[in-house]
Amino acid sequence: MGRHMSPWIALSLFPLSPLHPLLPLPTPPAAPPLPTTFISEGECCAACYEHRSTAARGGLDKGTNSSACNTWVFCGDPQRCGSRYGECWLKHHPALPPADAPQANGNTMWNSGIVYDDTAVAQAYEKYLKLTMHTVLGDLIVTLLPELAPNVVREIRREVLVLSQRGKGCGNCKFYRAEDFGIQGVILNPGCYIGTPDKGHPNGTDPKRKIPPGYVCRAGMAGSPHFFINFFDADWGDALCWGRVDDLSLAKIISKRPIKVKATPNELSMLVDELSFNMTLSQ
């Protein structure tokens, strides 16, 4: 079984339920296949999701197929599937593995996946408070701060889940700016949006509160996938902070990398070579 993320989920900007590969299945489950075939796992997954939506609206007839779909199986190997190529099977399993269970690998012609409830995924990943940004220079460890930015932290966890299921890394996660006071980067990947609006910062009635060194924030409470890592106390203003780096040694190494020639002294300090990173979660 391949490691994959359905295009239906991966390309959606809405918080649809992530899917997970199941154990390899030598034969499809005992349920009738859909009357039509599909061209991708994404369409099969979408059919399962739609089946769930129909069930939630009370639109399914009673009988063997009246349970809401939570498992899909797709035959996607033209050579091995033969006449069964494109078959999509929908199934309901009463007991599912945890949403953060390790993915299965196998070598069958059937690809399978699970559609979880959003709440189940969110709860399974609440315990992961460490985000590691892996670069060629080393790892930058960020402690997530859901108490400051719950929506952003939720989307970061979801993005790492998508990346792990695609198995290809983050195509546009990088550091691109280096200043004496900090470094700036972006987390941008189809299917997830860490720029989702949030409740803001807990400034309360203290307008003099400062952003501490090591905090990971975005400038302004409007949505943006760009972020900065602060090196010194700074005015909080409208910044939205979602993480904290306790060890700034690698971040300061990044800040010393060569920058592009500036036409004027007031231009931003952009790195000559942008530094890409991938991301994983841990407890």
Image (cartoon, rainbow, N blue to C red):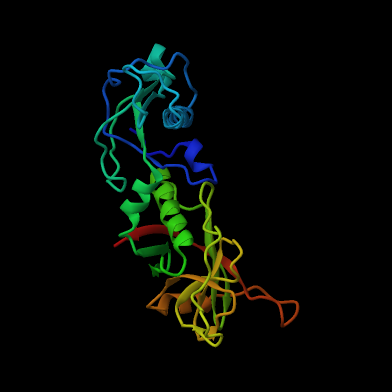
Instruction: Indicate the quadrant where residue 148 lies.
Output: bottom left
Q: Tell me what residue is drawn at x 36 percent, y 40 percent.
A: 116
132, above or below 110, in the image: below
205, above or below 90, in the image: below
Quarter occupied by the C terminus:
bottom left
Quarter occupied by the N terminus:
top left
Q: Tell me what residue is drawn at x 47 percent, y 79 percent.
A: 252
In the displayed orientation, state which residue is furthest to the right. 263
92, above or below 191, in the image: above
Residue 18 image position (x, y, % from top left): 41, 42
Residue 189 image position (x, y, % from top left): 53, 51
Q: Nearer the viewer, residue 190 or 79?
A: 190
Looking at the image, residue 228 sits to the left or right of residue 214; the answer is right
In the displayed orientation, state which residue is furthest to the top. 83
Q: Nearer the viewer, residue 31 or 55?
A: 55
Q: Nearer the viewer, residue 24 or 275?
A: 24
Looking at the image, residue 90 sits to the left or right of residue 53; the answer is left
Residue 187 image position (x, y, % from top left): 52, 59
Residue 30 image position (x, y, % from top left): 27, 18
| Number of numbered markers | 0
Instruction: Indicate the quadrant where residue 244 lies.
Output: bottom left
In the displayed orientation, state which residue is furthest to the front. 58
Q: Nearer the viewer, residue 106 or 124?
A: 124
Q: Tell me what residue is drawn at x 42 percent, y 79 percent.
A: 248
Instruction: Indicate the quadrant where residue 110 lies.
Output: top left
